[in-house]
């Protein structure tokens, strides 16, 4: 069975500072990995995805993530955050013949 | 292309009642998944339908059921509502099963 662990439930950061949101997964088969963002009272929006190929994946809003198979990680990074990045971020994993599993979420708060 | 739509957006019910939520996927998407999101449990997978067949089911009691129609629209039903069923119910569609999912805005269910 697959599982996802988001290591930080809350990450406070000042505006224009860099940020890393950590995600580790567990799976016995090849995986597809995703990061989603959720703004208050909204559904989830896809930030980026890793299906295959280059391990460095670039997404929307300046976010990127790196797939590290040996460390079973898929950490999300942004070099300079904005107030508007304040939201809940979810890491998710799926594979062939399995449903998508989400981490518990990381609440990113960007302070002025 | 229109996104995933969910109706209604907000719903208030009392214990013991039943409720039906509706989801219209993105045109051409054949897979529809349902999730329950609560502050305590996070995002939990309910079930996934593909071409009118339930392919996967999460760990929820039989009071939670769903179906998918030939046009890929999906409904989920919760019978004998309990206070703990209060949650944001999210629907997501994808082109194929086990692929990138696109989420609707959710239905906020409050059980009194």
Image (cartoon, rainbow, N blue to C red):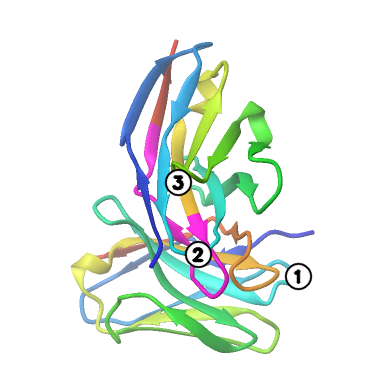
A24 on left or right of B82: right
B112 on left or right of B13: left
Q: Position of residue A86 (x, y in %)?
A: 47, 28
Q: Position of residue A6 (x, y in %)?
A: 36, 42
Q: Is the residue under label 1 in contact with that under label 3 (CB below 8 Å)?
A: no
Q: Nearer the viewer, mark 1 or mark 2?
A: 2
Badge 3 is on which residue? A72
C-alpha distance separating marks 3 and 1: 34 Å
Badge 1 is on which residue? B27
What chain does mark 3 sit on? A
Q: Residue furthest front?
A: A70
Q: Nearer the viewer, mark 3 or mark 1?
A: 3
> Mark 2, residues whose alpha carbon is within 10 Å: few (<14), some, or many (≥20)?
few
State yes or no: residue A99 in magenta: yes
What chain does mark 1 sit on? B
> Mark 3, residues whose alpha carbon is within 10 Å: few (<14), some, or many (≥20)?
some
Which quadrant of the figure contains the C terminus of chain B? bottom left
Front-most of residues B82 and B43: B43
| Magenta-colored span | A93-107
Residue at coordinates 56% horizontally, 89% vertically from top-left?
B53
Element type at marker 3? loop
State yes or no: residue A33 in magenta: no
Front-most of residues A87 and A69: A69
Badge 2 is on which residue? A29
Which quadrant of the figure contains the N terminus of chain B? bottom right
What chain does mark 2 sit on? A
With respect to residue A99, does A73 lie above or below? above
């Amino acid at each position: 069975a697959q599982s996802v662990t988001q290591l930080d439930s809350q990450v406070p950061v000042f505006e224009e500072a860099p940020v890393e949101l950590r995600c580790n997964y567990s799976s016995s088969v090849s995986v597809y990995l995703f990061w989603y963002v959720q703004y208050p009272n909204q559904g989830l929006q896809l930030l980026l995805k890793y299906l295959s190929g280059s391990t460095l994946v670039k997404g929307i809003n300046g976010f990127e993530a790196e797939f590290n198979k040996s460390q079973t990680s898929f950490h999300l990074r942004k070099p300079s955050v904005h107030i508007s990045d304040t939201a809940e971020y979810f890491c998710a994993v799926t594979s062939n013949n399995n449903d998508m599993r989400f981490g518990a979420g990381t609440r990113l708060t960007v302070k002025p | 292309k229109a996104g995933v739509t969910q109706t209604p957006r907000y719903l208030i019910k009392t214990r013991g009642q039943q409720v039906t939520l509706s989801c219209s996927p993105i045109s051409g998407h054949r897979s529809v998944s349902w999730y329950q999101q609560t502050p305590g449990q996070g995002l939990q997978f309910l079930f996934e339908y593909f071409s009118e067949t339930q392919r996967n089911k999460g760990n929820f009691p039989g009071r939670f059921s769903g179906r998918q129609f030939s046009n890929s629209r999906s409904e989920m039903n919760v019978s004998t509502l309990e206070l703990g069923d209060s949650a944001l119910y999210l629907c997501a569609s994808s082109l194929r099963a086990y692929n990138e999912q696109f989420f609707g805005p959710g239905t906020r269910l409050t059980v009194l």
